[in-house]
Amino acid sequence: MSRSSPFALLGNATSISWIEVPEWPAAELVRRTGAELDRGARLCAWFGVPDGDGTRLVAVIAFDADNTLAVARSTPTNGAYPSLTVTHPQAHLFEREVWEQHALTPVGHPWLKPVRKTAGDAPANGDFFRVDGGEIHEVAVGPVHAGIIEPGHFRFQCAGEEVLHLEIALGYQHRGIEHALTGGPHRVTANQMEAVSGDATIGHATAHAAVMEALAGTEAPLRAQWLRAIALELERLANHTGDLGALANDVAFLPTASACGKIRGDFLNLTALLCGNRFGRTLVRPGGCRHDLEPARLARLSEQLNVALRDVERACAWLWDAASVRARFENTGTVFTQQASDLGMVGPVARACGLVRDVRYDHPSGWYRLAQTPVAVWPDGDVFARARVRWLEVQRSGEFLQQQLAAAVDGGIREELPASAPDMLAVALVEGWRGEICHVALTDASGRFRRYKIVDPSFHNWIGLTLALRGQAISDFPVCNKSFSLSYCGFDL
Amino acid sequence: MFILDTLLHRLKRGRETLSYPQGPAPALPDRHGGALRVEAAKCPEGCKACVDVCPTEAIAARGSKGITLDLGRCLFCADCVATCPEGAITQTGDHRMAVRRREDLVLGEAGKEEVRLAAALDERLLKLFGRSLRLRLVSAGGDGSAEADINVLGTIGWDLGRFGIQFEASPRHADGLVITGPVSANMKLALKKTYDAMPDPKIVIAVGADAISGGPFSANPEVCGGAESVVPVDLYIPGWPPHPLTILDGLLRFLDRLEPEPARDAPRQGEDGDSLETRS
């Protein structure tokens, strides 16, 4: 660290005693968090912890360049506190969430409305931003969309074809995951963690396992960490391949679309070869992994991986060759670097805006401490850039897997996990295929969860999609949406 | 040159759609395990080992001896298989699991050791839907995995379209509703409206443990505990999520499009190398 921070510092996938976390009045926490964000930190999580009659605010921030995380908390607060969003927009959804969950009002927040609260049999959407004028029309889409996809509501303000403003209202998929974790872990917790966002099963299960291991003051056996990295990169390959195919489909470029649809399944089958389930269910557990990659299986996996990588290389070469594709991808749905940075965007969509941020590189934990892959960045912030970053990551994850499959480490894959320490706070970040997955656990005096916070990368990124649509033709919404490829259930929890 | 390249590549690869159901069904991945079989007669007196490890309370003790296992709640983690001291719960390796009645997923009693597979639609509906079934999917709190493995049925490897089954954008054009997810309270209204918008006669298919019973979320007050809480269900396809082959079998069974069943091999288990291959 170039300067000392008033926050308590900790590394990724480690824990800190709750009483060692510095506490200030809420207004002071807001001021100091803002000061840290001003000198380059990023807000990973901002949430409330009930304490007596009040609520403590907790800030988890990341100093990417220093490979360090930092936490601080407020004293128990009631009623209101000065909003952080006013000066630092990346806090906007976190403050809405805290307001919804703990009735703490961020004074000055520009758009305070529910995030996922229920109003009987639908989410409490609140009022939508409206543009007035004789030429203006409004388009409402969803929650049920025209496809095999999750539900959410999109409200466009348009002047003719042009989108002036898009507002996204989610919450339809809310399953009460965080609420159910209080007092846990329960017998079903590991399964629920795998379903936070089903296409990021390995990412969320790994973050949960890392939190549990940090609370127990231990780590998974090295071979289990190796297995988790292999499964995580397979998950990335499958999803990026599927997205590249779907992007091709959205601009009616069918050769790549149909080929990638199948190759995505080939990658899912590699995960199934490892653990029986195409999404990696039941593979990762706190304390290790449940299935090993014995030599015959490993050889088979390597062989099939090489075939699938060759296929995807071929299918995507057509995409990059086609001028018609480039014409549709370039300068469509642009998000500028400064916007992405101000909003705290993460993952491939942030890297496609030229931001160099990747948990595997900035905050390596598990196997990534021993093996790294270059960060894939593209500067333009448009659909082309988002597609291009995915393609770079397909190549690099492929190379990473080929290297790591040849560098297996011996040993066991699972150890009995000691009990969680009482009154501890643990933080784990994992670079899932959509970006930074953040799990934070706080234990009570008996070592059970007092509060468990999950931040899916989609929570940071949905706002980026709304900016991408500004000034675009509304007919470009599908390809813009697909280029972000965000999770509804991961956001709604 | 990409047009030529594309054409050459296509020609070289040939047909990539699986031959099933004319040919044999591909095997599930060996570690998948397939449907479970429960022989409660083997249960020792007072043993509740499997009941205690099941994450979703899919297994219930039946008095002091014996159990029932509800495949509609099962996440297929196989912890019960590993725990049972007498081998009363076994994996069959069989991908076929779809049923028409909820109680047909409950295993354990004598004569009910395995799922009682779905019968085809009645003659009237078969005449309407047998060669052309249009479906509308609603994810109601689904996690995206069952949705993905329904989507995959539309790819060239599976080609659901060859059976006349297609997914529609509008419920007004649909014959059937496919539901995934435990039905979050926040999706209840949208799900009901979608169902009401479909013309009669209509069918409902619940895909995955979440949609059948709420799965791992059944105890959460924020969800309704599955599709049946809102609409009547005609076909249940278990799994977490179900393998595409299980979903396809369910749809074809429903439409009476399966060839007469050949005698099946012995249950596939363990490290049988050849069973590792499946379709995308």
Image (cartoon, coloured by chain):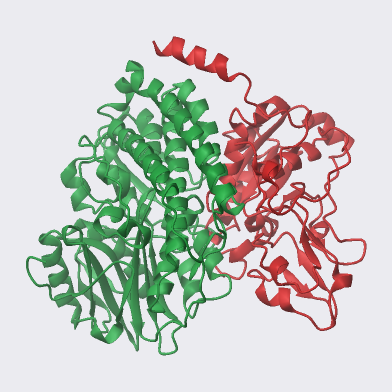
Q: Which quadrant would residue A422 be assigned to in this image?
A: bottom left
Q: Position of residue B8 (x, y in %)?
A: 51, 12
Where in the figure is residue B138, as x and y percent of width and height? Answer: 59, 46
- In this view, the residue in front, A405 or A361, is A405
What colour is chain A?
green
Task: Label the red chain with its letter.
Answer: B
Tell me the quarter of the image containing the N terminus of chain A: bottom left
Left or right, A79 with reference to B231? left
Q: Is residue A132 left or right of residue B125?
A: left
Residue at 50% in and 76% down: A185
Q: Is residue B75 visible?
A: yes
Q: Position of residue A297 (x, y in %)?
A: 58, 48
Residue A493 visible:
no
Q: Residue at x 77, y 61 (%)?
A: B90
Give the left or right position of residue B87, taking residue A420 as reference: right
Estimate the x, y position of residue B176 in percent, counting from the top left.
70, 39
* Quadrant housing residue B209: bottom right
Residue found at the far right of this picture: B111
Using the image, determine if residue A327 lies above or below residue B199.
Answer: above
Side of B70 where A379 appears, left or right? left
Q: Residue at x 84, y 29 (%)?
A: B127
Residue A429, compared with residue A449, is above or below; it is above
Check the image and report above or below for A242 versus A152.
above
Please identify the quarter of the rendering in which residue A107 is found.
bottom left
The number of numbered badges drawn on the structure is: 0
